[in-house]
Amino acid sequence: MNVDLISKYFTTLTDAQKQHFKGLEVLYQDWNQKINVVSRKDIDELYLRHVLHSLGIAKIQGFNEGSKILDVGTGGGFPGIPLAILFPNTHFTLVDAIGKKIKVVQEVVEGLQLENVSAKHIRVEDLTEQFDFIVSRAVAAMPTFVHWTKGKIKKDSAHERKNGIFYLKGGDLTEELKEYKTAEIFDLKEYFNEDFFETKKVVYLPQKFKNPS
């Protein structure tokens, strides 16, 4: 599958956005040979398993100009980089505790000349900034993730939805989310036709959620 998969679901991309999405494949194939941040199997399905999956968040929430988004445990740059391409007037901070992964992210950002992304080798607990939304792809169980990101979300919302977390997860989340009464779950199979998305979900957790005791 190639970059046309993105245009299939996001029909208003500018030429610049199309070029950025197209450039991802070459950059990740090149860097993945040096530093393995994407599995060998997944690199062949980069646009399905990583790019489009990341953009599932955009089907649930758009990000306003000037807002700030934090991608925690970004790995090779997902979901942050695809979202940053889609929302060029929103600033994205991508963090990971593993230095070699952030090096790849920095090189991809530089290769695409994305001006709305900063990548930092840091644990999220050590960040001092606050953000409108936090995004991530299943780096930990939700209670752990909520603990890591405590105090990192701005109180004042600039979007219709309350500030909070958008988390890409899969499978049955009943047990994991039972303490979070305000969590909303969106099935990505409602937005994308490919079999890959059959069990994939976006979890939205508004900022003022109830912490497990």
Image (cartoon, rainbow, N blue to C red):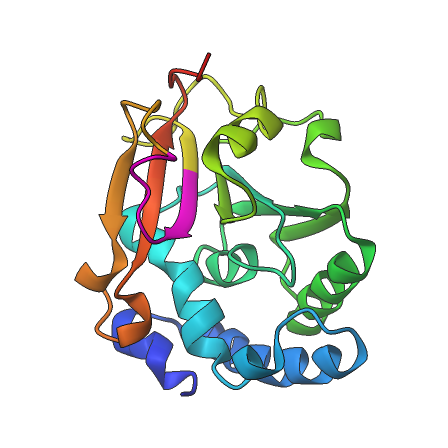
* Left or right for 151, reference 196: right
Name which residue lies at 39% across and 24% down: 157
Above or below, comparing residue 38 to residue 72 in the picture: below
Residue 123 horizontal/vertical position (percent):
74, 37
Residue 210: image quadrant is top left
Q: Quadrant of the N terminus?
A: bottom left
Per the rendered image, the range of residues in magenta is 166-176
Residue 170 sits inside the magenta stretch: yes
Residue 15 sits inside the magenta stretch: no
Above or below, comparing residue 57 to residue 45 in the picture: above
Name which residue lies at 46% across and 11% down: 213
Name which residue lies at 80% across and 79% down: 34
* Left or right for 5, reference 3: left
Q: Nearer the viewer, residue 132 or 73?
A: 73
Residue 95 horizontal/vertical position (percent):
68, 46
Residue 139 horizontal/vertical position (percent):
56, 47
Residue 15 visible at all: no
- Specify the farthest residue to the left: 190
Residue 3 visible at all: yes
